[in-house]
Image: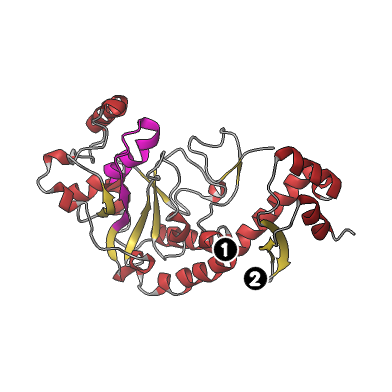
Amino acid sequence: MPIVVISKIHGYTQKGILVPNVYFGKGDLLKWHYESRFLWKTVGRKLAFEERDKRIFWRGAILNLNQGCELDRGNFERLEAASLTVKYPRLFDIRCHHSCSIHNYSLPYRTSKNKECYASWQKNMKVHATTINLSTVPNAIRLVQDDEYRDDSYFANYRGVLSLPGKISDGYSKSLNKYWGLGAVVFIWQHEYVEFYYPQLIPGKTHLILNSTNALDQASLILNRSSTVDTLIQGALNTAKSVVCASCLALYLKDFFISMRKHFRMDLVFDNAAALNKVFQQSQINCHKDFVELFIADGPIKKHNHLKMRTLPPAASCKALLRDYFKLS
């Protein structure tokens, strides 16, 4: 069986089949249907672009895992982005609102396990003119920390919203799920990781790529309204409505399950009680626990079929479970 993944840290060449991450409605597509529509129909429309704060906004955690390059890379990039707020407060509002493990106001790489990362950071600091060493700035911790929690509606007060790499292993960030419908220009920090829908994203049309080298120029684009800004806002909104909408995710998952079932001939096992019972026995599956069944049903999501889930009652044995499931005597 293939590996099913919600993101690939190093791009499409990694093994695994990409599926939607579990944070769209916390796994409940019907909940995501109403939640996402509320974002782009209400929250995203509460302020016109001209009325919004001109800065690029982000809130999240910055950790110091001290577990080596692979785990800490996302925190390196998050702190690198936060340093832009210190140098260009007129353009950036990128701060951590919890778990601000900045310590000596430098990047979290000055440890024995992270010497290679810290050396790489020092080299990059000489190249990235817009990035500064926070250890040289008085009260830097205060400048990049926000003690107040900001909910989704607060993000819509800004012209630009930023998606930064995840704090664990530089993976995806779940915040991006909601950014597309906020009526803002979406900025994505340059990275390697990918999700299932990224092939449909077009830099300059749906979002802008941000890094420490181009940050100043990119942020300047949203200081005034322009055809470029209008294109980006509409591109993000189109992504919300036709790429990551609830029915879009349901149809993607439906196609995924049908394709997997057909390619691997799962019907030979899952549609045969005797074969499935043998698999259960060989795998030492505990049939006394609840089993969950996914099925496709008609629903209110744009009148499309969507995935639903039901829990099968616990059975005395695997044989009894299968008998009830297949309605066998």
Residue 245: say if magenta: no
SS under mark 1: loop
Q: Position of residue 165 (x, y in %)?
A: 39, 44
Residue in the foreground of this view, choosing between 288 and 243? 288
Residue behind mark 1:
28
The one nearer the camera, 276 or 314, is 314
Rendered residue at 40%/32% (across/down) = 70
Query: In this picture, is 127 found above or below 253?
Result: above
What are the residue bounds of the magenta stretch? 56-81
Residue at the farthest left position:
138
The residue positioned 85% from the left and 46% from the top of the image is 274
Say if 71 sits above or below 326 in the image: above
Q: Position of residue 238 (x, y in %)?
A: 53, 62
Q: Quadrant of residue 326?
A: bottom right
Q: Is residue 251 visible?
A: yes
Nearer to me, 34 or 45: 34
Q: Which residue is mark 2?
A: 302
Label 1 vs label 2, nearer the camera? 1
Neighbour tally class for label 2: few under 14, some 14-19, many 20 plus, Cα within 10 Å = few
Lateral position of residue 258 relative to residue 143, left or right: right
- Classify residue 295 by image quadrant: bottom right
**Outermost residue toward the right?**
329
Q: Residue type at mark 2: give it.
A: Lys
